[in-house]
Image (tube, helix red, strand yellow):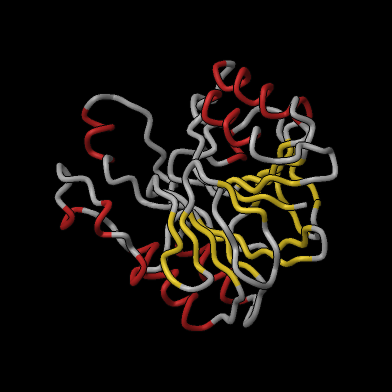
Amino acid sequence: MIYITGDMHGNIEQAKKVFNKINCKPENTLIVLGDFGGNYYLNKKDDTFKKVINDYGMQIFVIRGNHDANPIKVKGIAYTEKYGDKGYIEPKFSNIFYAKNGNEYNIEGNNFLVLGGAYSVDKWYRLNNKFIWFSDEQMTEEEKVEFWSKGILQTQTILSHTCPYSNIPKHLFLANINQSTVDTSMEMFLSEVKCKIKYDNWFFGHYHANEEVEQNMYMLYDGVIHYKPKGKLKIY
């Protein structure tokens, strides 16, 4: 079985609520759509959260969000193949797999195209207050060029952290953010993906809400979807 959920931000209590909704068998997989929070501080503070998640015993497939450090910055992490393509596994938390942007993975016979990353709308607040901000939080132009060079024209499911520009949930905008300062280049890139690549389902997080934004496109936060490749899906 495959389950999909949204941002956890390293919050153990929120994670527990998600796990209480699903069947945590070792052969099952939970996809987290970015801002997992396991690689945020890049020190032992992260380990408590990752141990709790890892100890549930099921497979955790993580998309990178704007509040997740690049896995290559994690000490001792291994670049390895799983689900038919390369990604990252930290040996002491071996149930957690960090997907690489631009790769297509096969989970239980289903293809998932991963395009993580987003812009932090609170970037300047974070910088001014010396909070953590990752300068490589979005896909780089080099990564986008590399992705397009693969010539992918069709996939079953697209997994991203943010969404195509036309699907931005403006009703969820934070009132204190000047939207003219927000970098939407990732959303514009995903709009191009939406136009050029045929897909059956699309899932994204980032906006802290649970909605079906259009047919076969779902935004998730603390909700869970039991994935199936065809048919109407329900958010729990």
Horizontal side, residue 164 vs residue 77: left or right: left
For the image shown, how many numbered marks are present on the structure?
0
- What residue sits 36% from the left and 67% below the top? 167
Q: Is residue 133 left or right of residue 70?
A: left
Q: Decide which of 24, 140 is in the foreground and name it.
A: 24
Residue 108: image location, x then y, percent:
82, 59
Q: Is residue 180 left or right of residue 225?
A: left
* Residue 233 lies in quadrant: bottom right
Image point 79% across, 31% down: which residue? Answer: 57
Q: Is residue 77 above or below residue 152?
A: above
**Residue, x 78% and y 52% (percent of image)?**
1
Position of residue 80 measured from the top left corner of the image (x, y, whole percent): 79, 47
Q: Name which quarter of the figure residue 17 lies in.
A: top right
- Is residue 26 in view from this perspective? yes
Vertical side of 16 occupied by 215: above or below: below
Quadrant of residue 47 within the rendered picture: top right
List x then y, in percent, for residue 43: 56, 19
Rendered position, 178 above or below 44: below
Identified at 59% across, 36% down, the residue is 18
Given residues 160 and 85, the one toward you in this image is 160
Observer able to see residue 151: no
Q: Position of residue 14 (x, y in %)?
A: 52, 30
Residue 163 in the image: above or below residue 77 = below
